[in-house]
Image (cartoon, rainbow, N blue to C red):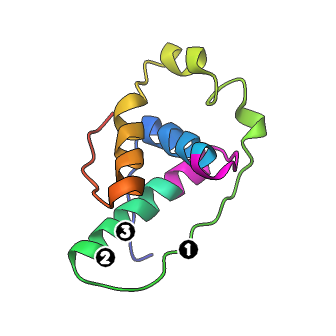
Amino acid sequence: MDLVIPVPDVASVAAMRHLHAVTGVMAGPSSGSCLWGAFSVLDRMRREGERGAVVMVVGDVGETYRDSYYDDSWVVGKGWRVEGPLSDMERFTATGAWGVSGG
């Protein structure tokens, strides 16, 4: 293993929702974690002047999570505020700027 990127639960949820909003792909929280990590790697590559491809595998389908991670009431009940991490994802997609706000 070359790199481990810790991803908070709320960031995983925000990322899976962002993936769905942008691509229509309804994935689960594991895929959200992968996307969050991919954005982090892309940011590091950009800052260090590296070029190359980053591949992400969508390893879980989101339909299973329709009544949990995709349900706003359920997410709020967990005490998660997805607005900050979701804003980070939207900003990165639009501008390439990655400034993680936390969650």
- Residue 87 at x, y percent in the picture: 37, 39
Q: Tag 3's secondary structure?
A: helix
Front residue of 29/17: it is 17
Residue labelled with disc 1: 55
Residue 82 sits in quarter: top left
Identify the image quadrant of the C terminus: top left
Viewer-proximal residue among 74 and 23: 23
Which residue type carries mark 3?
Answer: Val
Q: Mark 1 vs mark 3: which is more N-terminal?
A: 3
Residue 26: in magenta span = yes
At x 72%, y 42%, the residue is 62
Q: Which residue is mark 2?
A: 45
Instruction: Say which label, 2 or 1, has the lower sequence index.
Output: 2
Which portion, as a residue range, is magenta?
22-34
Secondary structure beneath disc 1? loop
Along the horizontal axis of the image, is 42 left or right of 17?
Answer: left
> Residue 32 or 84: which is nearer the viewer?
84
Evaluate if marks 1 and 3 touch, with contact meaning CB atoms under 8 Å apart: no
Amino acid on which the number 1 mark rests in the picture = Val
Q: Residue at x 53, y 44 (%)?
A: 18
Residue 22 screen position, x and y as percent: 58, 49
| Distance between the alpha carbons at the discs numbered 1 and 3 | 11 Å
Location of residue 26 by image quarter:
top right
Name the image quarter holding the N terminus: bottom left
Figure quadrant of residue 58: bottom right
Q: Which residue corresponds to mark 3?
A: 41
For marks 3 and 2, give the CA distance. Answer: 6 Å
How many other residues sit within 10 Å of disc 2, few (<14), some (14-19) or many (≥20)? Answer: some
Q: Residue at x 63, y 65 (%)?
A: 57
